[in-house]
Image: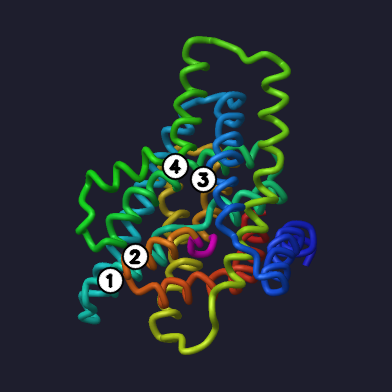
């Protein structure tokens, strides 16, 4: 109960605030989301890479993300083959289960649970996941039609990608920013997490209830919330991860389906109803699963 009250509940209240405001005012989310994507998130990414002590653990994190992604894709392909699902349904299940909400859900959970040290890992994990999602997410949403070139373009359309590159450039050449400029970056970066949390609540308010394909939704939620962290735990046994990083990646692997992936499903007509249903239900049930997981990990 203490974990729920001290870690999960504060995060949920921010989501719920966005949810209620959206139900009440029917706000256009796009301008807020655009500001978060093109201003706030790149600033937070830059600050994180500019100030973080980069070491071999980040290489292990990249390996971890790739191993988890491919394991989940393989599971979905095997399941879809057994059930004889068509390609679009297989893609919808991959979108719903292979891409987690490590940013506007996972990062604040990690901040409340493990403090600033864990939060740095969470932000870097978020950047890696965003790149993976923009590449493989587009590829599977378009059922392979988009091709590698289109997927790569999506990665390089991300402002966060350039924020990362600039930060790495400054670190490599041992440069430094003037204090006043960094203060500006710091102010914007601090606003990022609460903003994206409110956006998630608003996005969830737009998902309509009813007529869920409960068999497929149950499978997707089970893979996202249960199978994914179990696989993540197994991968951590194979990699020499720092104890704190181990906890962080397992918790992030247990977060619900990424809300961003719903937009890809809609754009490419890859079972958007199913993807949004799994996103909504996994987000609600994660209140229980994340609380239990945090209690187990300590």
Give me the C-alpha separation between circle 1 and circle 2. 6 Å
Give me the C-alpha separation between circle 1 and circle 4. 24 Å
Give the class, few, some or many, for how many residues have Cα within 10 Å of label 3's Cα (few <14, many ≥20). Answer: many
Residue 128: image location, x then y, percent: 44, 42
Q: Which mark is residue 128?
A: 4
- The structure residue drawn at horizontal position 63% and vertical position 15%, both measured from the top left corner, is 177
Based on the displayed image, in which of its 4 quarters is residue 219 positioned? bottom left
Find the magenta span and give its range.
255-259
- The structure residue drawn at horizontal position 71% and vertical position 59%, both measured from the top left corner, is 11
Q: Are marks 1 and 2 in contact (CB under 8 Å)?
A: yes
- The structure residue drawn at horizontal position 24% and vertical position 81%, both measured from the top left corner, is 83
Give me the C-alpha separation between circle 2 and circle 3. 19 Å
Magenta stretch: helix, strand or loop mostly: loop
| Mark 1 vs 4, N-terminal side | 1
Is 3 left, or right, of 233 in this rendering?
right
Pointer 2 residue: 94
Q: Are marks 3 and 1 in contact (CB under 8 Å)?
A: no
Specify the quadrant that holds the N terminus.
bottom right
Q: Which mark is residue 20?
A: none
Pointer 1 residue: 90
In the rendered image, the vertical position of residue 213 relative to residue 173, given as above or below: below
Give me the C-alpha separation between circle 3 and circle 1. 25 Å
């Amino acid at each position: 109960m203490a974990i729920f009250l001290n870690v999960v509940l504060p995060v949920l209240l921010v989501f719920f605030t966005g949810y209620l405001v959206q139900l009440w005012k029917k706000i256009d989310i796009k301008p807020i989301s655009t500001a978060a994507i093109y201003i706030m998130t790149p600033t937070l990414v830059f600050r994180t890479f500019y100030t973080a002590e980069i070491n071999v653990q980040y290489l292990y994190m990249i390996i971890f993300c790739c191993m988890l992604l491919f394991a989940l894709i393989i599971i979905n392909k095997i399941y879809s083959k057994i059930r004889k699902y068509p390609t679009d349904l297989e893609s919808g299940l991959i979108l719903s289960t292979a891409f987690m909400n490590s940013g506007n859900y996972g990062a604040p959970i990690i901040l409340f649970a493990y403090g600033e040290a864990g939060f740095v890992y969470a932000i870097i994990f978020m950047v890696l996941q965003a790149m993976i999602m923009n590449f493989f997410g587009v590829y599977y949403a378009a059922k392979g039609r988009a091709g590698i070139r289109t997927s790569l373009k999506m990665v390089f359309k991300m402002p966060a990608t350039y924020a990362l590159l600039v930060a790495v450039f400054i670190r490599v050449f041992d440069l430094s920013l003037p204090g006043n400029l960094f203060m500006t970056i710091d102010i914007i970066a601090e606003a990022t997490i609460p903003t994206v949390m409110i956006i998630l609540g608003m996005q969830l308010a737009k998902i309509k209830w009813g007529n869920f394909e409960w068999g497929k939704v149950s499978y997707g939620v089970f893979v996202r919330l249960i199978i994914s962290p179990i696989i993540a735990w197994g991968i951590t046994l194979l990699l020499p991860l720092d104890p704190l990083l181990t906890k962080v990646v397992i918790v992030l692997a247990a977060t619900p389906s990424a809300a961003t992936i719903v937009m890809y499903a809609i754009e490419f007509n890859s079972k958007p109803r199913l993807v949004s249903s799994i996103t909504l239900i996994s987000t609600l049930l994660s209140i229980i699963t994340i609380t239990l997981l945090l209690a187990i990990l300590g």
